[in-house]
């Protein structure tokens, strides 16, 4: 019994000693770790990380908050009130709709670029600066085909952004998106350029002249960012934020901006002429694929295929034929329809561009003069004889063979139609207007003369090129 007790005592001493050794070791390790954690953290930022502070400070004061109000007619305010010029029923009020977005100041004297969809149809446009000053803005001009618009406020010495060169933007480059999402003013988010020349088919709506060649980024953009700035780390404006790709209506990873080179050109047109001056090649185009590349004899898939060429268009007059592949414009590679349309749209009618094409098994250099949508090099402005502002449409003389086919000897054809009273009634491009309020139409001057006399409603008689005769009643 005593022997067993002695053994237990010895074991107890040994176990106790081991426990003490483990405790001291653990305590030493704990103290060591604590010492490491208490060491001061270096405040030095690695030199290779991007610095967004300067770009953000430069940008936020040049990005504005835009608030718009618009009236929407109800079923009570219908054609009969429009056409006969009657007053609305006593006490009736049209509902007011409010929308918000962003804009970018691009000059000291108050010119602001934004998206067309931000200000489209607005009766009132309010601009709020980052320092909370508020102004009423006027619409200078808009272009639905690029989703751009220019507005102006009466102020001087404003902070503004300079345009950068979007052609120099590279995939993987850091960018900042600045705008007013969810009415949260002066919001800055960062990301990289994910892709260029993206076409996401949001501007089409039956408009074959729509231009989509977006810069795609993963900088967070939400509702209210539309019309805001996309800038590089130098604070240069390289895009106008326009859209997101989302099933929820909120940001889910992709945002899209209109390239600055296209925006700068359209903005200049709107300020100078009130209308975009679009150059046209006079062709229909298709994306290249392996079959087309093999058919035309290219060693790899590149360029853009010309599916058809209008004989008296700019390309046709330069000797370009169907089946030609456009490889470059002004020395820049072209590998998508979006790139080709964007490059051409950066030029006005009458300007000369240089094409590198693949034709008849060899590469050629061709210079051509761009035309406008009506087949000439004339500048189209809101003040000239083509455009009727009250109707939101541009008119041209119909071709003689079309008039003979339809059995008519007078009329003016709608060449382009904007959002306005004609479009709202379902009237489409191509309609030949033969009579307005029973008066015979033979020129744009006739249209303007009749419209200026209208006090209430306008009766439109016309025929489409397919022979369908139509009658419309609209209010002005």
Image: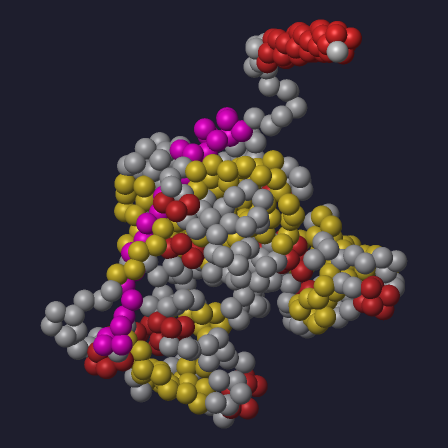
55 or 376: nearer the eye? 55
* Residue 231 pos. (x, y %): 53, 37
> Residue at image x 52%, y 32%?
235
Query: In the rendered image of this protein, does residue 89 appear above or below residue 343?
Result: below
Query: Percent from the top left, x then y, of residue 224?
Result: 41, 48
| The quarter of the displayed image where residue 388 is located | bottom left
Residue found at the very far bottom of the displayed protein: 407
Q: Residue at x 41, y 77 (%)?
A: 426
On the rendered structure, is 128 left or right of 313?
left
Residue 423 part of the magenta-drawn span = no
- Would you say 287 lies left or right of 298 here? left
358 or 170, which is in the foreground? 170
Q: Nearer the viewer, residue 5 or 36?
A: 5
| Quadrant where the C terminus is found in the figure | bottom left
Give, as a single range, the part of the protein colored magenta.
52-77
> Looking at the image, which residue is at 67% across and 42% down?
171
Placement of the N terminus among the 4 image quadrants? top right
User: Where 96 sits versus 224, above or below?
Assistant: below
Res. 429 in view = yes
- Residue occupying image coordinates x 48% and y 89%: 468
Side (left or right) of 289 relative to 248: right
Does residue 210 appear anywhere in the picture?
A: no
Q: Percent position (x, y) of residue 330?
A: 70, 49
């Amino acid at each position: 019994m005593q022997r067993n007790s002695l053994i237990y005592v010895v074991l107890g001493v040994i176990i106790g000693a081991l426990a003490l050794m483990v405790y001291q070791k653990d305590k030493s390790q704990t103290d060591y770790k604590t010492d490491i954690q208490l060491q001061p953290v270096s405040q030095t930022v690695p030199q290779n990380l991007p610095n967004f502070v300067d770009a953000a400070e430069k940008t936020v004061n040049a990005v504005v908050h835009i608030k718009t109000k618009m009236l929407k007619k109800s079923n009570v305010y219908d054609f009969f009130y429009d056409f006969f010029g009657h007053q609305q029923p006593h006490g009736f009020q049209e509902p007011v709709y409010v929308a918000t977005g962003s804009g970018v100041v691009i000059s000291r004297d108050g010119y602001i670029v934004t998206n067309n969809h931000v200000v489209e149809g607005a009766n009132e446009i309010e601009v709020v600066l980052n320092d909370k000053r508020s102004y009423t803005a006027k619409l200078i001009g808009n272009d639905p085909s690029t989703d751009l618009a220019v507005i102006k406020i009466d102020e001087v010495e404003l902070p503004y952004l300079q345009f950068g060169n979007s052609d120099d933007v590279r995939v993987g480059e850091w960018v900042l998106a600045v705008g007013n999402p969810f009415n949260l003013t002066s919001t800055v988010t960062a990301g990289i350029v994910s892709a260029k020349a993206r076409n996401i088919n949001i501007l089409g709506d039956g408009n074959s002249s729509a231009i989509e060649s977006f810069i795609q980024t993963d900088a967070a953009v939400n509702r209210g960012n539309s019309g805001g700035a996309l800038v590089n780390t130098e604070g240069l404006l390289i895009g106008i934020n326009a859209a997101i790709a989302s099933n929820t209506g909120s940001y889910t990873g992709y945002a899209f901006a209109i390239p600055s080179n296209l925006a700068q050109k359209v903005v200049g047109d709107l300020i100078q002429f009130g209308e975009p001056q679009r150059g046209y090649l006079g062709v229909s185009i298709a994306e290249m694929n392996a079959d087309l590349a093999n058919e035309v004899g290219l060693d790899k898939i590149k360029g853009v295929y010309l599916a058809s060429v209008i004989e008296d268009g700019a390309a046709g007059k330069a000797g370009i034929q169907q089946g030609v592949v456009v490889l470059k414009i002004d020395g820049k590679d072209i590998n998508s329809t979006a790139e080709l349309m964007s490059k051409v749209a950066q030029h006005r009618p009458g300007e000369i561009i240089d094409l590198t094409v693949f034709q008849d098994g060899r590469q050629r250099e061709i210079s051509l003069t761009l035309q406008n949508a009506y087949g000439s090099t004339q500048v189209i402005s809101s003040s000239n004889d083509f455009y009727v502002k009250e109707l939101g449409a541009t008119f041209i003389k119909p071709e003689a063979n079309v008039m003979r086919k339809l059995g008519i000897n007078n009329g003016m054809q709608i060449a382009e139609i904007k959002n306005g009273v004609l479009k709202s009634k379902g009237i489409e491009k191509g309609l030949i207007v033969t009579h307005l309020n029973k008066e015979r139409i033979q020129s744009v001057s006739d249209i303007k003369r009749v419209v200026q006399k209208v006090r209430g409603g306008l009766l439109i008689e016309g025929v489409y090129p397919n022979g369908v005769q139509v009658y419309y009643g609209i209010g002005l």
